[in-house]
Image: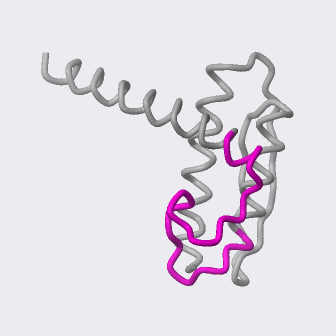
Amino acid sequence: MTSEKFQSEVNTVQKFITLYCKEKHSLQIIYTKNIVYNKDTFDIEVSLCKKCQSLFEYSLSRLQQCPHEIKPRCRKCSNPCYEKFQWKALAKIMRFSGLHLGVLKVKSFFRFHN
């Protein structure tokens, strides 16, 4: 996977987990991390609780180890790398955040057009 695609995937996971954590958990701690991928370095700063931080770290490690040149969606991957427990936790977060982001887009659309 290209560095640009990797950065895009990291940003997506970060956005979804951050939104979920902000809505569901009360105590977030600012967390910074440097990631190296394909000789490129990415700096990440995110506010998460310990549980969400652990899942975020796990997701980053899975992304870094993805063997596919063209990364498929994880749910359609023929060789999934997530353990079942983490997969279910991340799927729950993605479902919640995806729905929440969709509702926010609809709300802003109506605010803009009124």
User: Is-magenta flag for residue 79?
Assistant: yes
From the image, give the main secondary structure of the stretch colored magenta: loop
Determine the residue positioned at 60% across, 49% down: 13
Q: Is residue 75 above or below residue 23?
A: below
The picture quadrant where one finds residue 67 is bottom right
Q: Is residue 7 left or right of residue 24?
A: left
Q: Which residues are magenta?
A: 64-88
Determine the residue positioned at 67% across, 19% down: 24
In the rendered image, the residue lying farthest to the left is: 114
Q: Is residue 28 above or below residue 11?
A: above
- What is the quadrant of the N terminus in the image? bottom right
Depth check: give the residue in front, 106 or 75.
75
Depth check: give the residue in front, 37 or 76.
76
Q: Position of residue 78 (x, y in %)?
A: 57, 71
Q: Is residue 106 above or below residue 78?
A: above
Q: Is residue 32 above or below residue 9?
A: above
Q: Is residue 53 left or right of residue 104?
A: right
The picture quadrant where one finds residue 30 is top right
Depth check: give the residue in front, 42 or 105.
105
Determine the residue positioned at 60% across, 42% down: 91
Determine the residue positioned at 62% across, 20% down: 23
- What is the quadrant of the C terminus in the image? top left
Q: Position of residue 21 (x, y in %)?
A: 68, 28
Visual colour scheme: one colour
Q: Position of residue 89 (x, y in %)?
A: 69, 38
User: Is-magenta flag for residue 65?
Assistant: yes
Numbered disc total:
0
Q: Position of residue 27 (x, y in %)?
A: 80, 20
Depth check: give the residue in front, 76 or 19.
76
